[in-house]
């Protein structure tokens, strides 16, 4: 039986996700071969250092940034296509594809990183909680109290549920490993050069817009899955009202859904380095979150991902019945 006879993109994503959820990306493997995203970062960093020159005008830097983004996406996707076509037919190729694709999903590591904040915060160890939250957010952790730590970790959980799990599954289910790799490259570009500061405002502008487009549908799907998983459908009204207030055209959807589902307020002013960003509140009339709300958010995350899994199973069964 050929690989193509048994493997659809949706089925491949299910298998890949099962591998990632059980094993993640083991430390021993990371220290030996690093991680595909690390190698993507090396390529992007090398191009950025050579092409993002202060002496260039804004538009020249923007065009070079666009070139860097398109080159990285094209090269990574082409390598993915080449890899898929070089694998043998049958279950051997199927297993190898699933193992490779699993490295580009992050449901297990996301849970672990957020849980690492919840555990010390629940026993009042804010110092350890700040250290843990500093690994998943860019804001200054030294300025965060209990509510700030909880807010930052829950926001990261909501946004990365979309960026790190649902979006790659979405594009992988549509286009297989090449679609998954293309999305992950776009998301990595945004993480490295898509910042609104003096160095990256021009050079990373194209990458940031590309990431906005790639996450347009998955972010809204994530918000919907969170609302359905919570069974608190009043949260949908909060999503519709508040999601558009977020500075990101996409992150507001899963974050507003999480805020409404948990009955807490998220976003609001935060400090990055020496700069205070006056962000609007999501679900502003609600209370501030606490340590216990991180655990509630993690349970909701698991339920929402269970719905995603059921949806993928439905897609596979629908395709098999045709």
Image (tube, grey):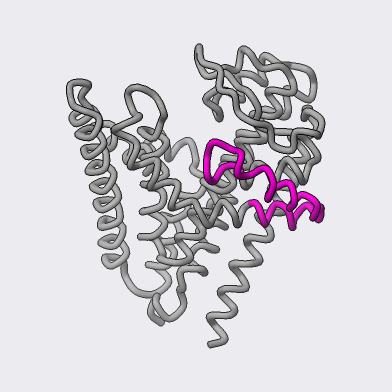
Q: Nearer the viewer, residue 158 or 317?
A: 158
**Quarter in which the N terminus is drawn:** bottom left
Tell whether 150 sits left or right of 169: right
Q: From where the camera sits, is residue 35 visible?
A: no
Predominant secondary structure in magenta?
Answer: helix
Rendered residue at 60%/33% (across/down): 113
Q: From where the camera sits, is residue 11 visible?
A: yes
Q: Which residues are magenta?
A: 223-252
Position above or below: 126 against 302: above
Position above or below: 295 against 87: above
Tell whether 158 sits left or right of 67: right
Where residue 282 sits in the image (x, y, percent)? 69, 37
Q: Nearer the viewer, residue 188 or 200?
A: 200
Rendered residue at 55%/50% (across/down): 165
Identify the image quadrant of residue 160.
Answer: top right
Tell whether 316 sits left or right of 224: left
Identify the image quadrant of residue 47.
Answer: top left
Magenta stretch contains residue 238: yes
């Amino acid at each position: 039986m050929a690989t193509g006879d048994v493997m659809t993109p949706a089925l491949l994503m299910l298998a890949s996700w099962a591998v990632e959820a059980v094993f993640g990306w083991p430390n021993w493997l990371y220290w030996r071969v690093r991680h595909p995203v690390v190698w993507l970062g090396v390529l992007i960093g090398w191009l950025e250092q050579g092409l993002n020159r202060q002496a260039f005008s804004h538009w020249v830097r923007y065009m070079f940034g666009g070139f860097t983004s398109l080159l990285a996406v094209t090269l990574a996707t082409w390598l993915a296509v080449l890899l898929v076509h070089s694998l043998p037919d049958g279950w051997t190729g199927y297993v190898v594809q699933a193992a490779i694709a699993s490295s580009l999903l992050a449901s297990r590591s996301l849970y672990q990183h957020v849980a690492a904040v919840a555990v010390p915060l629940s026993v009042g160890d804010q110092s350890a909680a700040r250290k843990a939250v500093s690994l998943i957010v860019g804001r200054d952790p030294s300025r965060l109290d209990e509510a700030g730590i909880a807010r930052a970790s829950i926001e990261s959980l909501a946004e990365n549920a979309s960026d790190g799990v649902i979006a790659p599954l979405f594009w992988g289910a549509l286009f297989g490993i090449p679609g998954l790799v293309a999305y992950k490259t776009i998301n990595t570009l945004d993480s490295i050069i898509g910042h609104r500061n003096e160095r990256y405002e021009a050079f990373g502008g194209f990458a940031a817009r590309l990431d906005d487009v790639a996450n347009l549908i998955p972010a809204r799907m994530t918000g919907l899955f969170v609302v359905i998983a919570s069974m608190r459908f009043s949260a949908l009204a909060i999503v519709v009202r508040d999601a558009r207030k977020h500075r990101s055209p996409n992150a507001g959807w899963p974050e507003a859904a999480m805020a409404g589902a948990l009955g807490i307020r998220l976003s609001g002013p935060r400090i990055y380095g020496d700069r205070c960003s006056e962000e609007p509140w999501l679900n502003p009339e609600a209370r501030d979150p606490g340590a216990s709300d991180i655990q509630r958010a993690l349970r909701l995350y698991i339920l929402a991902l269970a719905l995603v899994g059921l949806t993928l199973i439905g897609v596979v069964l629908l395709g098999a019945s045709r």
